[in-house]
Amino acid sequence: MERDTDGFFTGPPPESAKPPAPEEKKEEETPNPEAEKSPSDLIKSTFDVYVTLADQQQDPNSPLFSAKTFEELGLHENLLKGIFALGFTKPSKIQERALPLLLRDPPQNMIGQSQSGTGKTAAFVLTMLSRIDFSKNKTQAICLAPSRELARQIMTVINTMGKFTEVQTEYGIKDHLPRDATKITAHIVVGTPGTMTDLIRRRVIDVSELKVFVLDEADNMLDQDGLGDQTLRVKNMLPKRDDLQIVLFSATFPENVRQFAKKIAPNANMIELKQNELSLDSIRQFYMDCDSEERKYDILVSLYHLLTVGQSIIFCQASCSLCRHLRRSLKPPSQHRSTADRISQRMTAEGHKVASLHGAKDAHERDTIIDRFREGKEKVLITTNVVARGIDILQVNMVVNYDLPLLTERDRKASAGDAQPDIETYIHRIGRTGRFGRKGISINFVHNDKTWRQMQAIEHATGKKITCIKTDDIDRMEEELKKHLK
Ligand SMILES: Nc1ncnc2c1ncn2[C@@H]1O[C@H](COP(=O)(O)OP(=O)(O)OP(=O)(O)O)[C@@H](O)[C@H]1O
């Protein structure tokens, strides 16, 4: 593989990184390449959408399948008030195309893909809210998400958008309900698949009148390496009615999961924002050659000032290299502290203010940490993949991949070589910045041949340039990075 003068790996991206080939009848809109990328671009028609209707008799070019305003969707005025309370004036591109299809009667399944931060949540939340019969105290919509943090975020959107309605909501997440809870009658239940399975199996939730089943981050939720088994258990306990609307959304849909998704949501309308990668374009990607594992920590600390200009998220592996390094360097060694904790412990000891969040923390602690970060009380969050997906905090303008995301042990064995980068997780991680077209930067740390090759594979697969930033001149480094946030 050749590098050009900017350090960009040249050559065509592999098949897996190319836009999905149109399967059936597709519609394409004309992009406007001159348009500047800004939040409003998600509202203007500046990028392409593929729509594949389940019913090929219908004309996808019909204005019936596109809504330029929320008003024309025929929503109850209380829902419209909720939308405006969120500060939305017009549908985003994905909402414009997805909402008319999602809200139509009879209900139809939907598989929707669009880049991170383009407004998928509002699309499925509005669908759930608009289908509830508020006069019935029965659960009518269930939404599953891969983490409690994301479930809580979705709930906030439901409660804000639904605040002028009589909607009742409940969580299906760990340690939220008393163990002896016997009945949930809330209209909408949002949770994670394990807890939701338990609640439905024990008949705490009665699903007999369910109308909508939503999987956010659906590729992860259906992937056998992710939460696939648990999600299927939930799905198999739901009524097998044709009018149960199944809605799957994600920023990524690798081919193997895409096929499975079509089985889970049969005859679904498909909506894909064409992969001209608007979101990735608003995120400038960099890498830093850190020379050695040990230097990674020093470079992270030297970035601290910049990390706190806005807010930032630092991703490391669950058993991350920094933590292994810190475990060795901390005296006395802290045996029971896990991963991201050790980073924050050392940075805190050196006078920096950081928070850490990972799956080993208890539920209450996790809630407090993410809430504090969301409120801007902490500026730097050191974490694992637990918040890689879906978390929407507009002030996050920097993401650092301290450790690059890698595929699981199983995939690694299958490829029988070095660990391969996990491209989907990479896309989701950097998508924590640059929300709704805002500017953001991501920095990847590499320190040896192996990590270099992993980054090369990411650059190749995403087809996006990752620019080198020199680490020997901190002032220049800061200046250069700041330039991209302006
Ligand atoms: N029509 C709209 N007008 C203005 N802002 C919007 C609109 N729709 C969504 N947003 C805002 O855009 C941000 C990103 O939306 P959202 O979290 O739904 O993205 P997403 O596509 O689900 O991202 P991810 O793939 O990371 O889960 C949110 O802060 C949301 O409030």
Image (spheres, rainbow, N blue to C red):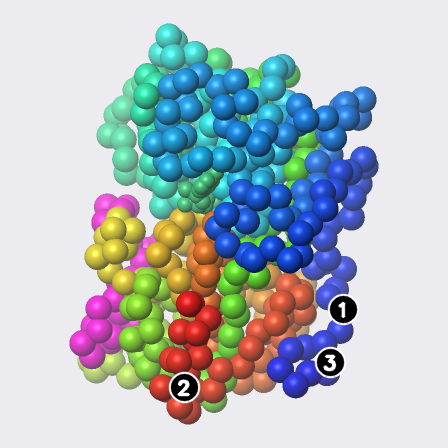
Residue 347 belongs to magenta span: yes
- Give the mark, 2 or 3, whose residue is nearer the N terminus: 3
Amino acid bearing label 3: Met
Q: Which amino acid does label 1 sit on?
A: Pro
Q: Mark 1 points at which residue?
A: 12
**Picture coordinates of residue 181 (x, y %)?**
27, 24
Q: Answer left or right for 246 relative to 207.
A: right
Q: Residue lying farthest top?
A: 135
**SS type, badge 2:** helix
CB at disc 2 and ligand 1 closer than 8 Å: no
Q: Is residue 243 left or right of residue 321?
A: right
Image point (49%, 35%), residue name: 90
Q: What residue type is labelled 2?
A: Arg
Residue beneath disc 2: 476
The span from disc 3 to disc 1 (Cα, nearest Å) is 11 Å
Magenta residue span? 341-370
Q: In this view, does 72 lie above or below 94?
A: above
Location of residue 302 in the rendering, given as x and y in whole percent from the top left corner: 32, 82
- Camera-nearest label, 2 or 3: 2
Visible in this render: residue 205?
no
Q: How crowded is mark 3: few (under 14 residues within 10 Å), some or many (20 or more)?
A: few
Residue at image point 72% right, 83% down: 2
In the image, what residue occupies the spot 75% across and 73% down?
A: 11
Could you tell whether 346 is left or right of 138 in the image? left
